[in-house]
Image (cartoon, rainbow, N blue to C red):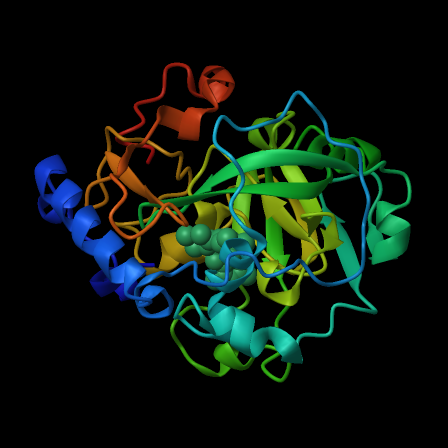
């Protein structure tokens, strides 16, 4: 995130088309020379998915325009600060996480509450596959086939009271399993939150798998949020608590730097991050010299716009 700004080009560094065309010719010359392993970030893009199979029918109502990224892109280029701040750290370090047995506590303003073994929590919910774009606040994006179920289904089951205006999601706190928590780079545990109408929108999704497999640890095993119209940091990983609240929770990134990271975090090309533009994005896996893409409002999920009617999205960023 903000601590890795050196890895992301600034808007002023975006390569004009003529220059990248020229570079592409240089690149193909290099490729012919056999240098692909050095210069291609997706040299292993054909590696096969691994982990326990988790078959689920695809929901055709949720597919992306772009082809999905490779399994390797999705599982080796991650943000999961509990395992380090480099994109490659989670894949390398998340082996210490024990995703089973796992339990989740449901608390706060709801008629039903309690601590549930993950399997019991999941039992009533049929799994489906949805292809969602995930857009990081650092201006890169990926397209991933997730397996899970709508967050709204879980929320309805626990019968939030009329006082429940927000939902908070808390990641595991255990510096033995999550060695990155020995550093003070963020306040632990990682907490994210949604307004209850956002949380019950049909797009909000709880994922337990991807690419037909159970979630690998670096992807947020065994249970993570996917909120495709918001910057990636809203999609909390390895969730152990879900709380219904009357007031907005203090969310980790907004606490760490309130000027740069807001509670809403809706993908918005018209509101720049204080240190870089949000107008364009880099599609992970598209190649080093692929042109940047235009960022779309709400990451292309325009059906959520009515949740924010009357709100100034530059103020409520
Ligand atoms: N617990 C926790 N959840 C997290 C993060 C994190 O550091 N810790 N990073 C967030 C950010 S910034 C992004 S972009 C997404 C990345 O998800 P992915 O690695 O599956 O692509 O996870 C989000 N969820
Ligand atoms: Mo992110």
Give the vertical position of 303 relative to 9 (above or below). Answer: above
In the rendered image, residue 89, in percent from the top left (x then y), is placed at: 47, 73
What residue is rendered at 26% in x and 53% in y?
28
What residue is rendered at 85% in x and 49% in y?
121
Rendering quarter of residue 299: top left
Apparent side of residue 200 relative to residue 269 in the rendered image (left or right): right
In the rendered image, residue 19, in percent from the top left (x then y), is placed at: 9, 43
In the rendered image, residue 312, in percent from the top left (x then y), is placed at: 30, 23
Give the vertical position of 29 relative to 134 (above or below). Answer: below
Q: Nearer the viewer, residue 289 or 199?
A: 289
Residue 9 showing in the rendered view? yes
Rendering quarter of residue 244: top right
Apparent side of residue 312 relative to residue 196 in the rendered image (left or right): left
In the rendered image, residue 153, in percent from the top left (x then y), is placed at: 77, 32
Rendering quarter of residue 204: top right
Give the vertical position of 113 relative to 77 (above or below). Answer: above
Apparent side of residue 146 relative to residue 22 in the rendered image (left or right): right
Apparent side of residue 8 relative to residue 107 in the rendered image (left or right): left
Give the vertical position of 105 relative to 194 (above or below). Answer: below
């Amino acid at each position: 995130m903000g601590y890795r700004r050196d890895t992301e080009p600034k808007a002023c560094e975006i390569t004009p088309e003529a220059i990248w065309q020229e570079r592409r010719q240089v690149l193909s010359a290099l490729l012919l020379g056999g240098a692909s392993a050095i210069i291609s970030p997706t040299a292993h893009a054909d590696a096969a998915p691994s982990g326990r199979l988790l078959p689920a029918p695809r929901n055709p109502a949720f597919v992306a325009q772009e082809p999905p990224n490779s399994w390797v892109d999705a599982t080796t280029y991650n943000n999961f600060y509990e395992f380090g701040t480099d994109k490659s750290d989670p894949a390398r370090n998340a082996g210490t996480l024990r995703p089973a047995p796992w339990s989740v506590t449901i608390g706060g303003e709801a008629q039903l509450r309690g601590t549930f073994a993950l399997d019991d929590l999941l039992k009533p919910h049929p799994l489906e596959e949805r292809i969602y774009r995930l857009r990081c606040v650092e201006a890169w994006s990926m397209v991933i086939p997730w397996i899970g179920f709508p967050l709204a289904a879980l929320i309805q089951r626990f019968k939030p009271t009329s006082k429940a205006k927000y939902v908070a999601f808390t990641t595991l706190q255990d510096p033995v399993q999550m060695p990155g928590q020995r550093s003070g780079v963020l306040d632990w545990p990682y907490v994210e939150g949604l307004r209850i109408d956002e949380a019950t929108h049909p797009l909000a999704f709880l994922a337990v798998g991807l690419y037909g497999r159970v979630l690998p640890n670096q992807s947020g095993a065994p249970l993570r949020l996917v909120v495709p119209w918001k910057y990636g940091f809203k999609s909390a990983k390895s969730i152990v608590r879900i709380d219904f609240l009357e007031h907005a929770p203090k969310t980790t990134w907004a606490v760490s730097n309130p000027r740069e990271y807001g509670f809403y975090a809706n993908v918005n090309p018209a509101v720049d991050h204080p240190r870089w533009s949000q107008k364009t994005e880099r599609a992970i896996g598209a190649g080093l010299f692929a042109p940047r893409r235009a960022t779309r409002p709400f990451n292309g999920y325009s059906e959520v716009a009515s949740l924010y009617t009357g709100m100034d999205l530059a103020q409520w960023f």
